Image: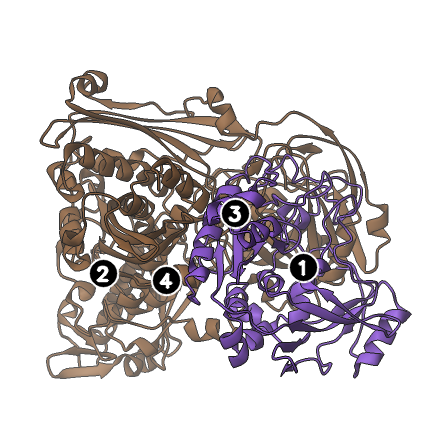
């Protein structure tokens, strides 16, 4: 096993001789996307004319299908097949895993007549056109035996249980420490259900050739999707060719496959014809995973100087009855602030809802909504500046594990942000700044998000014309993965960027874990780098061993790569000349990355500080963002442009969390109220004014050979709390119930006599 | 989506004739609402009569100094018209607070008045809705009805009318001019065009089958300030929680009823010399909240008082 020490030696990326690393590089696939010519899964042209599928969703939360009348649908124009649980082709039972190495188990569609959530697929129609399929689907008549369902989270808190295999984490003696603290805070915060709301719905185009199925689908994890479909169809995974080239947003919601994948494959086999299936916008809300609601009790006990003596977050959340998942809203806090006495833990309510699951910064995004407000409240109780309070509780080592930090620039983020944002202009007394009908306030919050490296492989081919092609079973969910992989490959091999091609999202390619958990760039990028290093060694051996090369006979470890050439001092030749002469069919190598054996000897995170200025309409309680600034420390930045887009996009996500996003469950039906983008409110352009961000210089040499870390989720961490704190500073209304809509703010204004 | 037929008549007479020939047909104008409703299986017209190219897209000054706005003018065209902006700023403000720029570029004056409610239960075909399926019930009653109406509701429907433009037109005493299926013309106050739900929430306007809105006529601009204020959950592309149009002692509300709501008791009280808070309270006393939407009473009261303050100060904010 390798050690992180191996990563500290200089390498082509850290030396960055061509200067490609860190540059503002336009998106590799940007032109295709903005011209509408990047084929997304539903748009891929199959080898022959396709049929179109439409899933029918359950309209009860729990029960059984007693009868289902499909006669009208079958007689509807253009209909090719109608399936229910009674006649859908046989699939492996849910959770079955014939191949123990499969990353995902079987996930059958319409596996039984039981309904476990509102929106579950209970029937499926395929027709010659999408319109005919939809019209027929609307004619299916279902009779249910409805059973009582648990769908109201706040009314079901008494059913909360310890999540399977977990325990509370206690360090020191929290209750004594809390009791003996001179200043105490004990508040409860609520963050509601949120939907991923990807622009592109889940969609699949499938066709068969013999016993092998090709599926173009929208999924974040190539192997996960391939294995799930193989297990469900009970076929070997090498009989599933899964392709996912372009993905219109995932955010964790496409970390798994849904019935569009299974039903497209099954119907294509049945009809002996390609089949396209997409979820409707309504099904995206009702029938895919969501971020669960979380109720968080925060208790802080501090000494008069601000030092925390006791610290606790207890989070209650929920998941689907048969699909365990815990939104770990307390975990992030275990590495954030120093305190000798600490208690954190989670409880889980099993509910009859669609699966709760990961959404961008699962745990952190919700958890920081509570603690980072509580710190603001505690600062006020102590008469301390909120930044100063955080600095006084800055730990020197990880406060729970005692491990050293790999690199931690949280305090620098806060100080840099305070200076650039103009924090010193903040009046610590709320409600003192007015601009016309707007009360204006400033708030801040800290952010922390873990960093990970997973095993991954990659392949690089160089052809005789000098074209370098990186191929990897990785995905780009809109983040810039194509682009950064091209940069890493170009810099590692010393070739111009426009000589590099990147091919992703294919199960035939060397596997990478995909996009999620902020591990994508570090994992896929490190594999690409290591593969580039294999290629360098291969080419060096090739040149120095070839009597016709100007490099013949020199020490292969001394040759350099730059400008598309392999060289040693004044002897050089181009890669294309070398390959055309020695191996005209091209050179292909694979490489891989694995976590270092000692990687977990360090506490390793990304950090940020978020600053927000809001206006609160003193008449209506409307909150409008005026400006927002974030300072982040996340290792070496590969591409200033795509990294900034991602981190600022995360901040924008957090603005929605703070101000608009929620999807209440109608307790009578167990369904979401909002099922389109006119009802489920994410920020519009007009909501986002003057949002900016910057990265601090950083290299984390404990992270991976590139010294990089993830930026996909950090931008959300703390955003909502910074806005909540700004609202308080603006008008003196302290809300602990997200999102902070006008009705809630107005109630607070009235209570204050405003 | 159900199959349908489509025609695009060249003149108004042909459009009216087409509707007479097919009483279940619908006029298609900008399509920003109807096409969505068809795709969502909420409307199923067998035939569409596309009036998009009828010569109804001009804005003329009337002899008395008001404006006649063709039914097929776009929302963007009306909101950016110099006469509208100078004489009726309340209308321009209301229009640009609605939808999004893309929608306003397509949406028309007539279509805006004909748009249907955004009640989430109306859009959810799996739920009862008397408007969508008469007799099926109202899921919003006793449901998640933070956004529903507080005036003029019934046990059959508590939905709201989503138009911002309509609220401004109502306060300006604007009238629609129509052509009936029989070819007769008539005129109707915008404030009287929409029906309250009663027992028949599926019947939304006083227009007869096949009747075409040809124009909206606004009387000369009243003296004094004009204000449109809209409260919403986000800064753009969101329906009003509540909105208010205030002009010359007249007040109309949006987001509180199934029609643009003229606060007549408030107007009468103001005319009688009552103070603003009392005058606003006179209308609010008749509100019928249903739990989650009760905040609208306080909100519209505060908003109206602020808007009246602004207009009475003579400012055109």
**Chain identifier for the purple-coloured part of the image:** B
Task: Residue A366: name its quadrant.
Answer: top left
- The image position of residue A152, as x and y in percent, is 54, 30
User: Chain A appears in which tint?
Assistant: brown
Crowd around label 4: few <14 · some 14–19 · many ≥20 (10 Å): many
Left or right, A487 with reference to A3: right
Give the residue pinned by disc 1.
B191
Instruction: Give the residue at x 63% y 65%.
Output: B173
Disc number lying in front (1 or 2): 1
Q: Is residue A206 left or right of residue A413?
A: right
Mark 4 lies on residue:
A481
Which chain is mark 2 on? A
Please indicate whether residue A137 sits to the left or right of residue A515 in the image.
right
Which chain is home to disc 1?
B
Name the residue beneath numbered marker 2: A694
| Cα distance in 3D space between marks 4 and 1 | 55 Å
> What chain letter is assigned to the residue under label 4?
A
Task: Check disc 2: other Cα within 10 Å, few if <14, some if 14-19, many if 20+.
Answer: some
Does label 1 lie on the same chain as label 4?
Answer: no
* Residue linked to disc 3: B280
């Amino acid at each position: 096993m390798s050690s992180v020490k191996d990563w500290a030696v200089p390498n082509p990326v850290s030396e960055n001789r061509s200067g490609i690393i860190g540059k503002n590089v336009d998106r590799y696939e940007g032109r295709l996307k903005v011209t509408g010519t990047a084929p997304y899964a539903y748009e891929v042209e199959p080898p022959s004319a396709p049929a179109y599928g439409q899933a029918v969703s359950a309209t009860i939360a729990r029960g059984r299908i007693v009868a289902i009348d499909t006669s009208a649908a079958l007689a509807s124009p253009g209909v090719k097949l109608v399936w229910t649980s009674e006649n859908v082709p046989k699939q492996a039972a849910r959770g079955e895993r014939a191949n123990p190495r499969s990353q995902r188990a079987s996930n059958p569609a319409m596996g039984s007549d039981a309904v476990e959530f509102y929106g579950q697929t209970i029937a499926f129609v395929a027709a010659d056109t999408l319109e005919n399929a939809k019209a027929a689907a609307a004619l299916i008549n279902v009779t249910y035996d409805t059973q009582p369902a648990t769908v109201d989270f706040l009314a079901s808190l008494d059913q909360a249980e310890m999540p399977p295999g977990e325990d509370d984490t206690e360090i020191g003696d929290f209750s004594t420490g809390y009791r003996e603290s001179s200043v105490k805070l004990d508040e409860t915060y609520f963050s509601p259900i949120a939907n991923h709301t990807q622009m592109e719905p889940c969609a699949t185009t499938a066709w068969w050739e013999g016993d092998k199925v090709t599926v173009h689908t929208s999924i974040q994890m190539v192997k996960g999707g391939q294995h799930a479909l193989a297990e469900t169809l009970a076929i070997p995974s090498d009989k599933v060719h899964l392709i996912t080239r372009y993905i219109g947003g995932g955010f964790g919601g496409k970390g798994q496959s849904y019935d569009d994948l299974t039903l497209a494959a099954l119907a294509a086999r049945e009809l002996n014809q390609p089949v396209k299936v997409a979820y409707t916008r309504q099904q995206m809300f009702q029938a895919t995973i969501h971020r669960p609601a979380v109720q968080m009790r925060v208790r802080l006990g501090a000494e008069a100087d601000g030092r925390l003596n006791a610290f606790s977050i207890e989070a209650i959340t929920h998941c689907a009855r048969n699909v365990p998942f815990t939104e770990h809203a307390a975990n992030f806090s275990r590495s954030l602030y120093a305190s000798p006495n600490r208690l954190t833990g989670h409880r889980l309510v099993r509910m009859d809802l669609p699966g709760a699951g990961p959404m961008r910064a699962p745990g952190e995004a919700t958890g920081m909504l509570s603690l980072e407000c509580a710190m603001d409240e505690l600062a006020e109780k102590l008469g301390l500046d909120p930044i100063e309070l955080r600095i006084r509780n800055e730990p020197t080592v990880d406060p729970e594990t005692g491990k050293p930090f790999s690199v931690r620039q949280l305090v620098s983020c806060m100080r840099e942000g305070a200076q650039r944002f103009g924090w010193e202009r903040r009046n610590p007394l709320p409600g003192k700044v007015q601009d016309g009908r707007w009360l204006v306030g400033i708030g801040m919050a800290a952010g922390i998000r873990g960093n990970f490296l997973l095993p991954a492989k990659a392949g690089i081919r160089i052809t005789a014309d000098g074209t370098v092609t990186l191929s990897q079973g990785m995905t780009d969910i809109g983040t810039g993965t194509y682009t950064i992989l091209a940069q890493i490959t170009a810099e590692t091999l010393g070739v111009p960027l426009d000589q590099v091609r990147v091919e992703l999202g294919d199960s035939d390619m060397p596997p990478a874990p995909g996009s999620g958990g902020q591990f994508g760039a570090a994992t896929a990028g490190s594999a690409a780098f290591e593969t580039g290093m294999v290629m360098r060694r291969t080419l060096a051996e090739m040149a120095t061993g070839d009597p016709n090369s100007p490099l013949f006979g020199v020490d292969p470890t001394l040759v350099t790569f730059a400008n598309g050439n392999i060289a040693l001092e004044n002897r050089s030749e181009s890669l294309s000349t070398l390959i055309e002469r020695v191996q005209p069919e091209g050179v292909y190598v694979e490489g891989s990355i694995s976590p270092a054996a000692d990687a977990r000897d360090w506490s390793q995170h990304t950090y940020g500080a978020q600053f927000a200025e809001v206006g609160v309409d003193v008449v209506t309680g409307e909150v409008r963002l005026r400006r927002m600034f974030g300072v982040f420390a996340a290792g070496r930045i590969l591409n200033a442009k795509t990294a900034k887009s991602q981190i600022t996009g995360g901040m924008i996500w957090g603005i929605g969390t703070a101000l608009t996003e929620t999807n209440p469950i109608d307790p009578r039906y167990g369904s979401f109220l909002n099922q389109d983008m006119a009802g489920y409110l994410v920020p519009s352009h007009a909501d986002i004014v003057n949002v900016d961000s910057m990265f601090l210089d950083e290299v984390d040499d404990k992270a991976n050979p590139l010294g990089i870390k993830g930026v996909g989720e950090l931008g959300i961490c703390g955003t909502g709390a910074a806005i909540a704190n700004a609202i308080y500073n603006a008008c003196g209304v302290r809300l602990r119930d997200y999102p902070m809509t006008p009705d809630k703010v107005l109630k607070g204004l009235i209570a204050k006599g405003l | 989506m159900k199959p349908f037929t489509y025609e695009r008549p060249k003149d108004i007479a042909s459009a009216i004739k087409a509707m007479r020939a097919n009483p279940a047909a619908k006029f298609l104008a900008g399509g920003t609402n109807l096409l969505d409703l068809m795709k969502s299986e909420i409307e199923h017209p067998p035939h569409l009569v596309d009036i998009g190219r009828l010569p109804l897209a001009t804005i003329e000054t009337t002899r008395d100094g008001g404006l006649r706005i063709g039914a097929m003018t776009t929302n963007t065209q009306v909101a950016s018209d110099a006469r509208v902006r100078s004489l009726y700023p309340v209308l321009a403000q209301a229009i640009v607070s609605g939808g999004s720029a893309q929608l306003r570029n397509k949406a028309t004056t007539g279509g805006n008045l004909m748009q249907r409610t955004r009640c989430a239960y109306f859009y959810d075909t799996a739920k009862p809705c008397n408007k969508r399926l008469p007799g099926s019930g109202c899921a919003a009653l006793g449901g998640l009805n933070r956004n529903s109406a507080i005036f003029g509701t019934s046990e059959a429907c508590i939905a709201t009318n989503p138009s911002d433009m309509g609220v401004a037109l109502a306060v300006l005493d604007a009238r629609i001019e129509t052509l009936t299926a029989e070819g007769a013309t008539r005129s109707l106050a915008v404030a009287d065009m929409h029906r309250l739900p009663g027992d028949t929430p599926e019947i939304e306007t006083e227009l007869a089958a096949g009747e075409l809105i040809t124009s909206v006529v606004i009387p000369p601009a009243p003296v004094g300030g004009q204000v449109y204020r809209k409260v919403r959950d986000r800064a753009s592309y969101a329906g009003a929680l509540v909105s208010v149009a205030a002009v010359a002692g007249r007040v109309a509300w949006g987001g509180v009823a199934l029609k643009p709501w003229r606060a007549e008791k408030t107007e009468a009280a103001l005319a009688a010399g009552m103070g603003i808070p009392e005058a606003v309270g006179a209308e609010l006393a008749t509100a019928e909240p249903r739990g989650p939407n009760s905040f609208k009473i306080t909100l519209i009261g505060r908003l109206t008082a602020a808007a009246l303050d602004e207009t009475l100060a003579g400012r055109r904010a």
